Image (cartoon, rainbow, N blue to C red):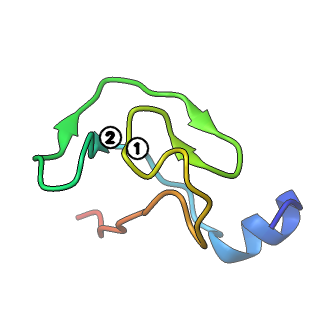
Amino acid sequence: MNDLRALMREFPFPGRLEAIFLRPARGRAALGAAACEALDGLGLEGDRAGFRSRNHQVAFLPTRSP
């Protein structure tokens, strides 16, 4: 999904990032992060899955606003 229009069709509503969690190693607890670098096609730097190609690299968990 390299095209911005296609991405906007998939996620048509505005949102906000509330938290970033990175998993440093298998079996270790996720760590909260104030910031991280997104690696194109790989995921988030500092996450154990960040250097392996997968079908998806980042999970967005939607919530409803009151």
Seen at 43% across and 63% down, the residue is 59
Q: Which quadrant would the N terminus be assigned to in this image?
A: bottom right
Q: Secondary structure at mark 2?
A: loop
Task: Residue 36: give x, y in percent of width and height.
Answer: 45, 27
Q: CA distance from mark 2 to mark 1?
A: 8 Å
Seen at 75% across and 75% down, the residue is 9
Task: Residue 45: give x, y in percent of width and height.
Answer: 48, 33
Q: Nearer the viewer, residue 1 or 17?
A: 1
Name the residue that disc number 2 marks: 20
Q: For mark 1, does the 10 Å Cα neighbourhood hold few (<14), some (14 to 19), or many (20 or more) residues? A: few
Seen at 39% across and 33% down, the residue is 46
Q: Quadrant of residue 19?
A: top left
User: Is 31 located above or below residue 25 in the figure?
Assistant: above
Left or right: where does residue 57 sit relative to residue 16?
Answer: right
> For the residue marked with disc 2, what is the amino acid?
Ile
Seen at 40% across and 24% down, the residue is 35
Name the residue that disc number 1 marks: 17
Q: Is residue 19 visible?
A: no
Give the mark toward the camera: 2 or 1: 2
Left or right: where does residue 13 sit relative to residue 21?
Answer: right
Task: Residue 60: give x, y in percent of width and height.
Answer: 43, 62
Q: Secondary structure at mark 1?
A: loop
Q: For mark 2, does the 10 Å Cα neighbourhood hold few (<14), some (14 to 19), or many (20 or more) residues? A: few
Give the numbered dot on residue 32: none
Q: Which quadrant would the C terminus be assigned to in this image?
A: bottom left
Task: Residue 58: give x, y in percent of width and height.
Answer: 48, 57
> For the residue marked with disc 1, what is the amino acid?
Leu
Query: Does the residue at mark 2 contact the one at mark 1 (Cβ under 8 Å)?
Result: yes
State the count of labels: 2
Q: Is residue 54 visible?
A: yes
